[in-house]
Amino acid sequence: MGQDPELLRRLLRAKDRMDAASQEEWPVRRLAEVSGTSAAHFARSFRQAFGVPPHRYLLTRRIERAMALLRETDLPITEIAFQTGWNSLGTFGRTFRDVTGDNPAAIREREKATPHQRERVPECVLRAAGRPGLTIAVSEKRRRAEGDTEDPEEMEVL
């Protein structure tokens, strides 16, 4: 069932704000205000419209930006962490590793060691190829890595 076009426009407004300032804090309450909806309605509608919850979408943008800064600048990793919205280097490193499978320093070294001809590839393709996969929550990835293979969504409710 499709969503109301007016609601989609308001959700896109909130999504655009996150894209423009992904380093800022974007609690659901603030995003709901931007879109003119209640917090619960916003969270539910955002997930339905874009396939991921707002927080996971924001993590994706932050990781994409961090990867670009690692690739294109010589900024210290601590500075990249703060510029992309993390308040702690430890949280940044752990989340980055959970999402990408590698730590920021390793990504930077690999990118610098590999010659690229990026100017020949359209920017939209580069961004899509570099987008981290956040179809499941970071906590779910950790749980699976620790060997707990039961899917909580498939568990019966007693």
Image (cartoon, rainbow, N blue to C red):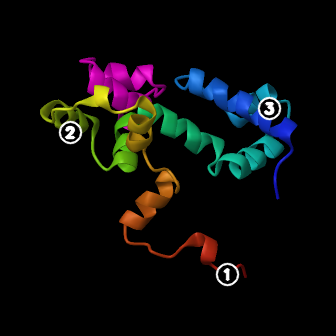
Disc nearer the start of the sequence (1/3): 3
Type of amino acid under label 2: Ala
The residue drawn where x is 78% and y is 41% is 42
**Quarter of the picture holding the C terminus:** bottom right
Image vertical order of residue 58 relative to residue 70, above or below: below
Query: Looking at the picture, how far across and down is residue 66, in whole percent?
Result: 38, 29
Q: Which residue is mark 2?
A: 106
Q: Which residue is mark 3?
A: 10
Task: From the image, state whether disc 3 or disc 2 is nearer to you.
Answer: 3
Type of amino acid under label 3: Arg
Query: Looking at the picture, how far across and down is residue 121, in whole percent?
Result: 34, 33
Query: Looking at the picture, how far across and down is residue 72, in whole percent?
Result: 29, 22
Q: Is residue 150 left or right of residue 118?
A: right
Decide whether residue 10 is among the magenta residues: no
Quarter of the image for residue 109 reads top left
Q: How many marks?
A: 3
The Cα–Cα distance between marks 1 and 3, rounded to whole angstroms, is: 36 Å
The residue drawn where x is 80% and y is 27% is 33
The Cα–Cα distance between marks 3 and 2, rounded to whole angstroms, is: 39 Å
Q: Which residue is mark 1?
A: 156
Q: Secondary structure at mark 2?
A: helix
The Cα–Cα distance between marks 1 and 2, rounded to whole angstroms, is: 41 Å
Q: Is residue 99 left or right of residue 6?
A: left
Q: Which mark is residue 1?
A: none
Q: In the rendered structure, which segment of residues is drawn in magenta?
A: 65-90
Q: Is residue 24 left or right of residue 84?
A: right
